[in-house]
Amino acid sequence: MPDSEAMLGYGSTFSIATSADSPTEYVSLGEIFSITPPSATVDMVDVTHMQSVNRTREFISGLIDAGECSLEINYIPGSLGDLELREILALAVGVTRRRQALIRYPNGVTTTFMTELMSYEKSVPLDDKMTATVTFKVTGVETYGVIT
């Protein structure tokens, strides 16, 4: 039986472009302990009509929704990641919040995609670590590659 190729997520990183105009300058959102990468879904369009065979619904594929990407991080007030996320959220209405995001996996595979920051939810408990959940809406398609 061949050895498994399973990997730990340890060493994965998530970075976001510092501006909509500069997708080559990134800020790493540090101390991430969980990444949920985008998960696309395909809309199903109901095309049932009065003569559909055996009164059975019929469907065709619709548009693809690229989904969301979320992160669980240690919340560190005033960190570079915290400042970047708060800056994006504070942008005026009509100013684009769209940023390119980059996930780098331990084996060097990367995925990049355009995002809109949806939420930055912080938790400050009395007797445990402070954490935050960051959720991005993915817009457009993901691009996969390898950075050596």
Image (cartoon, rainbow, N blue to C red):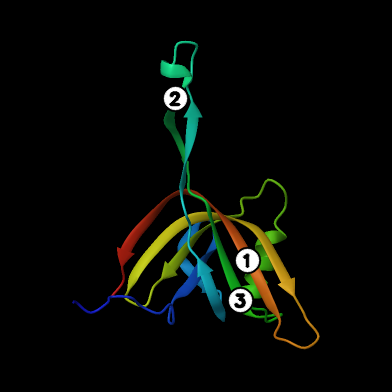
Residue 30 in sight in this render: no
Q: Residues within 10 Å of mark 2 (few under 14, many from 20)?
A: few
Residue drawn at x 48%, y 24% is: 57
Quarter occupied by residue 34 = bottom right
The answer to whether mark 3 and mark 2 are in CB contact below 8 A is: no
Q: Which quadrant holds residue 106?
A: bottom left
Kind of element beneath mark 1: strand
Residue under label 2: 58
Marks 3 and 1 close (CB-CB < 8 Å): yes
Dot 2 falls on a residue whose secondary structure is loop
Which disc number belongs to residue 73? 3
Residue 108's image quarter?
Answer: bottom left
Q: Position of residue 118 (x, y in %)?
A: 65, 56
How many other residues sit within 10 Å of disc 3, few (<14), some (14-19) or many (≥20)?
many
Q: Is residue 110 visible?
A: yes
**Residue of label 1:** 134
In the image, farthest residue toward the front: 54
- Residue at 65% over, 50% down: 95
